[in-house]
Amino acid sequence: MAELSPTAQDGEYRLGFAGDAFNTSWYLARLSPDTDVSFLTAIGDDSLSRQMMDLFAQSGIKENYVQHLENQTIGMYMISLQNGERSFHYWRGQSAAKKLADDPQKLATAFSENDVIYFSGITLAILPDKSRQGFLAALKTAKEAGKTIVFDPNLRPRLWETADAMTSAIMQGAAVSTIVLPSFEDEAEWFHDENPMATLNRYKALGIPTVIVKNGPDPVLFEHNGHSGEYPVAPITEVTDTTAAGDSFNAGFLARFGSGDIEWAIKGGAELAARVVQSRGALVAKATEMD
């Protein structure tokens, strides 16, 4: 999506491009330049769409699964900040990305040609119901074929007709995944989990091998192939902007997940997220230069 983010000057905004799944892809491409990172979406044929594709090229993100649709455009959002916490204003009704799952064959091809597939609750939220069900079915097939399916629930109630529709779709998304990366604050609000362990156990009950429960400055709770524990998060003295905190954590985690050391992977996610929230905006280049 096109992103309007506040600058250091009052009342001024900067045009950029971001979005939860894209943010994770962008950070992962920077952290793991030897890894092929592709992005599946649909865009328009206008100048904003072309500018976003320029960013893909500059970032090392392959666009071989991007569908270019005539007379379409991309969504846009504006960030408002107060004491480091962000709120969003969206213009996404016209977004071409709503059509990203309309072609079952293109979806199946993209999933079959990649080892790891990452999606989020926002991916599910923007899709019409029929397309969402087709998307989930394709993920299920990919999982059965041995692909690693990674899911961040990223609960955003404003994108759903009802809270029940949201929570139902989130659990459907989790059920076709092998790694789930929830944030406890959101899970507690919408699933009424009493503590992070309740969140972990709810997803674990679906038979998911790896569940990582993010919890802001508190320890990360994890379950991985029958091994569970907590990973303490180093304190941060000053938070500037929490935009992309979870997205960057996911990238830092995935960049190290292949090592087989789950705590090392969590450490990578927590350290990257800590650097990101001390800067403005979703995409913070200097946060990856310290690795």
Image: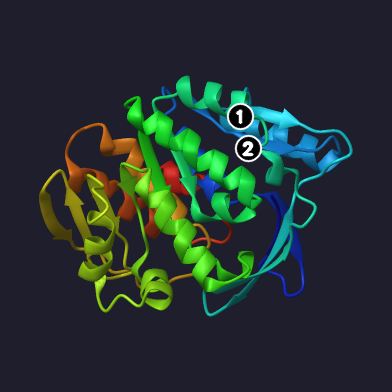
* Residue matched to label 1: 104
Dot 2 amino acid type: Ala
- Vertical placement of 3 versus 209: above or below? below
Cβ–Cβ below 8 Å for labels 2 and 1? yes
Q: Evaluate whether residue 176 shows in this view.
A: yes
Mark 1 belongs to which amino acid?
A: Pro
Front residue (pair 148, 33): 148
Q: Residue at x 74, y 52 (%)?
A: 75
Please say whether residue 27 is visible from this viewpoint: no
Q: Residues within 10 Å of mark 2 (few under 14, many from 20)?
A: many
- Coloring basis for residues: rainbow
Number of dots carrying numbers: 2
Q: Farthest residue in the right direction?
A: 71
52, 171: nearer the viewer: 171
In the rendered structure, the answer to whether residue 162 lies left or right of residue 154 reads right
Secondary structure under the numbered disc 1 in the rendered image: helix
- What mark, if any, has residue 101 been given in the picture? 2
In this rendering, the answer to whether 255 lies above or below 65 is below
Looking at the image, residue 101 sits to the left or right of residue 21; the answer is right
Q: CA distance from mark 2 to mark 1?
A: 7 Å
Seen from the viewer's position, the closer of residues 200 and 89 is 200
Residue 227 in percent (x, y) is at 10, 49
Residue at x-position 71% and y-position 30% = 67
Q: Is residue 62 left or right of residue 167?
A: right
Question: Which type of secondary structure does the marked residue at label 2 adopt?
Answer: loop
Q: Residues within 10 Å of mark 1 (few under 14, many from 20)?
A: some
How far across and down, in percent of the image, does residue 253 sit? 32, 45
Side of 215 relative to 231 (left or right) = right
